[in-house]
Image (cartoon, grey):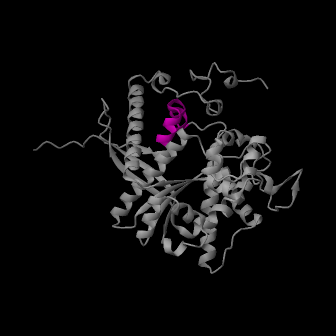
Amino acid sequence: MGKISTRSKKYIIPNYSITGDLIAFNECPLQYRFVNKGSLPPSVPVQEWFGEFIHGIMEEAFLVWKDDKEKGIESKFPWNFEKTQEISIEIEKRLRGKGLKPYRNIFTDEKDGKKIQGKKKAEDYIANKRAFLSINMWGRYLFPLIEDNEVKLLGVRNMPASLVKKRVDMYNITGIADVITSFNIRKYSGTGNKLVEYLKEIPEIKEKLEEKEDVQIIVDYKGTMRPDRKKLEQYIHQITLYMWLQEKNNAAKELKTPIVAGVLLFLNELCPIREDLPVLESINEHEFKDKFQATSRDWDIVKSQEILDGEEFSDEFRYRRSIEIIPNEPEKIEESLEWADRTVEMHEECVLKELENSKDVLSCWEPTKYDKKRCTACDSKLICPLTREKSECRPHVP
């Protein structure tokens, strides 16, 4: 009787989410180890709530717009506050069911926009206001272009060759594209669609728009202010990798529609608040007026710190601050793939260190450079070697 063969050893290809793993790891390996990899929920999930809130708002608003269109109802913009508030309330309920709650009086579930609660109207709560503006300022231009939303993307890469020791030979790279648009430039030229007009301002994109019948762009929402250059570069890698993954999807389906660009929308820029002034003050005057086309009034508001509710900034300044367009170019894709491989290599090295020395996690996942805003909100600050001696990170007696 012949020998019965044994089952081959289980082989699992690790998944690396572009936002949940690659960007999070680059922010801080130690924080990533406990929150993302260790599945320990942050005690104050401020940014997580607002990020999911604004994503939910734009996704639900698009579904409402699409449903109205299918029913033959003309959903004209701007939508009134009561209509956007219904969506805001629904999204907040969903997040609350997931254990995510808003903080510091930034949201209200009051339905009547004119009803005063103490000294504050419902439309003056920052989360509700940003939802209203996001739908009416960008939704009006984006929704008619949308082909698909919440698209799951998956690709496979070889593990970096420079890794001395490898657990496996490959890794999955994953992401979720908020929006994939498909449109013909001839249909929207001259219609006043700001997204299309901004795309046409970039020569290499304009050329592709005009020579192809239909094109795609990938859009990603960010519930933040426009970040500094270092963080912006990570987001650019993210959207560039989305383009690479979607190109593979299209090739598998034998679709020939080219992806011409990726777009990042920083929706908090539509309504800055006083806490955002340091971000705006860091912009030099030349960039302020040339790149973002700020008016003298916009400049005066920032320098005098007279910001009240964010809407006193000019519309054009807020539009341009809230958008970053990244052309789809082979060299950019190659740079982003190299960034992904470098990050995976560093991550794998940390994993292997912990496998060899599981009793000393802190020595396996080193923190990055100290950042006051990030570090003071981190639940690992009392054990982190960078923060435990910082006065602002020490526990305070109430």
Residue 35 among magenta residues? yes
Q: Residue at x 70, y 58 (%)?
A: 315
Q: Nearer the viewer, residue 351 or 186?
A: 186
Q: Position of residue 376 (x, y in %)?
A: 65, 30
Q: Is 291 located above or below residue 76 in the figure?
A: above
Q: Position of residue 22 (x, y in %)?
A: 46, 41
**In the displayed structure image, the side of residue 289 where residue 83 appears, left or right:** right
Q: Is residue 25 visible?
A: yes
Residue at 41% over, 48% down? 332
Q: Is residue 140 above or below residue 283?
A: below
Quadrant holding the C terminus: top right
Does the rendering let one see residue 37? no
Query: Does 159 sit left or right of 287 as displayed?
Result: left
Closer to the camera in the image, 363 or 41: 363
* Residue displayed at 43% across by 43% down: 16
Give the magenta part as a residue range: 20-39
Q: Residue furthest top?
A: 389
Q: Where's residue 303, x and y in %?
A: 75, 41
Could you tell me what secondary structure mostly forms the magenta stretch?
helix
Q: Between 201 and 251, which is closer to the camera in this rendering?
A: 201
68 drawn magenta: no
Hey, which quadrant is residue 90 in on the image?
bottom right
